[in-house]
Every structure is written in structure tokens, then in C-alpha cells.
Amino acid sequence: MKKLNVMLTLLLATACACTDNLSEDVAPYNEQPLSRSMNATLTTEEAQQQFAEILSKAVYDHVELRNFLKAQALKQFDNDYDVFYPLVKDEQVGDLGTFREVLLGYIPEADLCTIEAALPLLNIYVPNLSLFVDVTPENWDTTDQDVPVAVKNQDEPNTLMYLNGEFVDKMAGDEIPDFHFLYIKNNERVRKTRSRNINGMNGYEFISEVFDGTRSKPQVTSCAVQSRATSSAYDIDWVPASKIDPVVITAWKTMKNNPSLQRDNIYYGMTPTKTEGTLNRTIDEYIYRFQIDPAAYYSIADQKGTGDKKDDPMIKDETLEKKGGYYSDEETISRLWTEGNFEFCIQVFTGTNNIKELTPSEYVFNIKPQELFNIVITKWRKHRTWFRKAKYYCKIEPDKLERKWVYPRELKYAHDNRLPKWDISTQSLERFVTIFEFDEDETYEMTQSKVTTYTHNFKTSVEGNVGNNKWGAKVGLGYDSTTSTQVGSTIKISTTKGSDQLGTLTFYFYDSIIIEENSSKGYRLKNVSNGTVTMTLMPMTETFSRGN
């Protein structure tokens, strides 16, 4: 196993019921107890270290267990590659029995109970180090039994590595391994609760809905991942026709004299001469793209991890020096930008049936720094002299970051970006979108006052009268402000005190979608911005969405 020495801090966390029944395929523990006898109680650090030793033996011996841990990590139950022991300990590991039964082949049951009692939040993290090296849960080759288990050293600021139950190495804070391993830690995204079976987690709950992985599973099973490390025409305001649903382009051409009516054409099939239509239920609205002003870097890259909290990725105030040539851009970024992703939560509020308190739909995006910004690397060199070889220098400066569009479906791991259907026969003409960069802290709620507008130019399908029936036809282009209803509403934002609030955006059903066409560049879209966040919503058919 090799180590890639880079000046980066290793922080690998984004992150007892006893039984006498053992599987016949798992040999019961028949060796002497661990060299350090277990007391009735253990500290968190002691229990984590002893669990790491035990797990390293089991993982070394059983490819079925390695397969099991990989499969569990890829589920991302908490939006990270975590295997939460209390939830999976009673699940089957191939033909070996349950996970817990496998471990009981290496430790007396009383000792395992002691560890479990000391670690109610015991977590096994399968690291994703793709920002620095090609080590991800997806490419973990489980046929390789040399998979060490890492745990924080309780006495020193470094990490201990165990392989097959034996201590094999220490890893300092300036080292990133270029091999797969497991990391033992408490899970910082869930907590104990007295309630039962919340989201299938008996006795546990997420500290925030942001971490509920069942709410943010991507609905796209495949998509092309584009790497846009530098600015291009697609990164700025113009979008090629191939990236826009043809129904949107048709609406632009049909409603060019009144671009604000494009959604009437898309959703209801209405034209300047056809002013009545019914809702097309194959259309959905999507978070098509968004970007963060680089000036916000100083607020979103502010969390210094303590305990089980993780650092925000941030630029090191350092200059790289090398003889014989520059570092590659990829290696420069890996050395000068600390490990981790930004975690953005987007909450979308839509008024329904005149309800005054609006509830959000929530979307979570884990985004690498180079996916969020174009990273400009400053390079210079000192020429060779008779007493000195040439030296090459690289530096990254926050003030030189450039804006970049984030297309949720084109991130390395595609994200769900489909919003609830926008049916204005029962829903408001406005949608409010809040966005914050999530940092772990105490949860709380904040409210904002809004005004929602409801239009009434719909007729029932039976009586033909003008009313408010979602199955009826829309009558007339646009809406009549003199007959519409306005309701004072509130949006309740659930967040944490440490999260970085990036503001609220307001979208209207009668916003334009395309606002300009260029024969060589494509189309310019309507964006909504609050100065810090700029976002584009886009309708799409189910067919176009699946294909893109």
C-alpha cells in the first residue's frame, strides 16, 4: 500500500441487543479475549479502536462482507457513503449470517455488547477521495482482501491503520492514501430518538431532512458527465438547442410576440389564436441550472470541523514550489484545496389551494469545488542561475475564482432536479426557492412572509362554467389580475444555525423561458438572481428528460 504525500488535512467524515444465535456458517469465537481486556464501559475512542481491530479481521477473511459493506455504502442512506452499524447489524451477509453474527466469530458476545453500548452512533465510512486520487466506493475492488480499517488515534493527532487485526501503520494529517480503506467514526447525520421506525430507522432519526437519502435519489439512471474545467459558451449565458426540449423552442417561436406566455403554450397547448386548452400532464418543471457568485466563497467555505463535524472545502493560503516544471492543474487543486464537497440544500415552495403556510420540496446537491467554480491557477517561475535551478510556483486565490453554471444532471453523480408539477388551476403563480450551504449545527426554523396569487380562468369539464377545477380547461391566455386572488402566506425554512443562507428567489409561471435566439450560439434563457445565487427553471417533457 502506497501513500500519496500531499499537504491536505485528512478528514474522512462528511464522516445492544445481544443474541445467542449464530449462523452455522460462522464459527463462534473460540480464541482468547482481546489483548486489552474490556471493562464494563469503554470510552468512545477505545470502543472505536477495538471495533476497528475486529472489523479488520472479518473484512480480511470474507469477500462477502466486503461486498456487503460496498453495497450498503453505495445506498447513501444519509447522502454520504456511510454504513450505519445499528441499522445494518442484523442484515444478512451472503450465506455467512447477519453482520453481527460475522463479527461474533472474532469476539466474545459480551465484549461486542460493550462496544455497541459505547457506540450508539457507530459508523463505517467508505471514503470517496476522487478529488485527489482515483479512490471511490464505486471502484472498490472487493476481491482484494488487503483493505485496512482506519480509526482516529486517541492519544495523537493521526490515524491508525489495522489489517487482519494487526496494527500496520500510522497516517499523519498531511497524507492522503491512494488505496481503498474503511474509516470508523460516529455518524454525525443521525441521532437517537424515542420514536420508532422513522423512515425505517428504528430508534434513530436524521438530524435534518437534508440528510435523508431516500428523498434525494436521482431519477436519471444514466447521463453523460461533462467536464467543464474552463469557461466555454455553454458555461455562460448561451445554451445550444440540443440541450433544450424542443417543446420549449416551439413555445419561443410561437409566442415570440409575447414571450411571457411560453408556459401557456407548453402546459396548455395555447397559441395566439387558440386560447383554450387543458393541462399536458407529461410536462414537469426542473431546476435546470444554478450558479453561485464566487464572492460567496468566503461565507460557504467557513466551517472548521471539530469533533464529528467536517471542514468545508477551502483554499489553502500556500504557494506550491517545484523544480523541473509545474504541477498539473489536477494535482495543484488536490494540494491547495482541502478535501470535501460543498453541500447545498434547495427548498422549493409552491402555494396550493390558498393554504397560507407553504411546505417545501427539498433537494440536496453535493458539489465539488471544481464543479461549482472555474478555478484559476496562477503560475510563475524563477529562472535558473549559476547557483540555483529553475523553480516553478503555483497558487490559487479566492478572488480569482470564476462563476460557473452547475447543471444538476451533469454532476459526477446525477441529482434529482424535478419539481412537483406546476398546475395553476390549484397552485399559485409564484414559486419561492431558498438555498443554503449546509453546515452541521443545531437545527432551527425561520419564516418569511410572501404573497401568493391564484388565477380563476378555468372552467369545469362538465358544466363549462369558469371556476377553479384542475381537470378543467384554461380559458384565455395569461390571467386577469382583476379576478385573481392574492393570499398572504409564509414559508418556513428548516435549516441549522451554522448553515450559510444564500437567499430566496421568486419565480413566476408567466416568466419568459427563452428570451433571445442566436443562429450560432443557441438560446439565452431567463434567469432569476438575488446577486448571490442565479437560477434557471425549465419545463421538460418526460421523453426529453429521460433522454437527457
Image (cartoon, grey):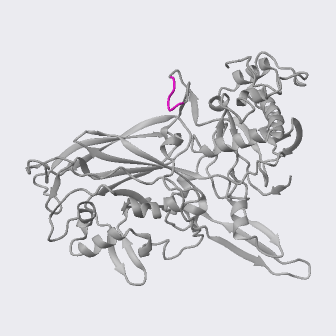
From what the image shows, is residue 18 above or below residue 370? above
Give residue 119's position: percent from left, percent from top.
Answer: 69, 26
> Along the line of sight, which residue is nearer the eye, 102 or 287?
102
Q: What stretch is highlighted in magenta?
A: 196-200
**For residue 133, what is the image quadrant?**
bottom right
Residue farthest to the bottom, as pictured: 520
> Along the line of sight, which residue is nearer the eye, 320 or 486?
486
Give residue 355's position: percent from left, percent from top.
Answer: 25, 39
Q: Does the magenta stretch include residue 86?
A: no
- At x 38%, y 43%, the residue is 360
> Along the line of sight, which residue is nearer the eye, 136 or 480?
136
- At x 57%, y 44%, the residue is 79
In this rendering, position of residue 472 left or right of residue 358: left
- Magenta: main secondary structure equals loop
> Along the line of sight, which residue is nearer the eye, 256 or 70?
70
In this rendering, position of residue 385 left or right of residue 541: right
